[in-house]
Amino acid sequence: SGPIRKKLYVVGDFSDSAWQHQDHRQFEYKGDGVYQVVTNEKPGSYRMQYAAKTWTPQFTAKGLSLKLGQDNPLIKGGYGKDTAVTIMAEGRYVWSLQFDQQGTPLKVMASKCAE
C-alpha cells in the first residue's frame, strides 16, 4: 500500500550492506505518504539513495546532503546523485520518506532515536 508501488530501501556504502538492498533497511509504509525504517548505525560519513531493488524508482536529498533531525527536500535520484550524511554517534536512527498521493517525492529525514 502507499503511493510507491515497489518496496524501497536505504541503500548505500554502509558497512552492513555495501550498496546491497538489505531486508533490515527496507522501508515500511506508515500511512499519509510516509515510509520509515529504523536501523543501527555506526559513526562515519556515508553516501546513499532510497531505492527499489530494480533501482527504479530511486530518490535522493535535494542538494545531495542530509542534515540529521531536519526535513530535507526529496527528489528523484539517479547515477552519481547520492545523498551524503555524517553520523556522529552510534545508535538507532529512523529514516523517513514522504510522498504525495501521486508518488511525487516531498521530504526525507533521518534522526537519532531517543534512547
Image (cartoon, helix red, strand yellow):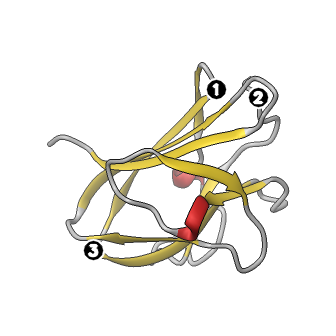
Q: Amino acid at mark 3?
A: Pro
Direction left: furthest residue: 115
Q: Which residue is mark 3?
A: 43
Which label lies toward us, 1 or 3? 1
SS class, disc 1:
loop
Q: Can the viewer see residue 11 in this picture? A: no
Q: Residues within 10 Å of mark 2 (few under 14, many from 20)?
A: some
- Residue 56 — which label? none
Direction top: furthest residue: 32
First in sequence, mark 2 or 1: give its number.
Answer: 2
Q: Amino acid at mark 1?
A: Gly
Q: Residues within 10 Å of mark 1 (few under 14, many from 20)?
A: many
Q: Amino acid at mark 2?
A: Pro
- Residue 33 — which label? 1
Marks 2 and 1 in Cβ contact (< 8 Å): yes
SS class, disc 3:
loop
Q: Which residue is mark 2?
A: 3
Q: Is residue 21 above or below residue 34?
A: below
The residue closer to the viewer here, 92 or 32, is 32
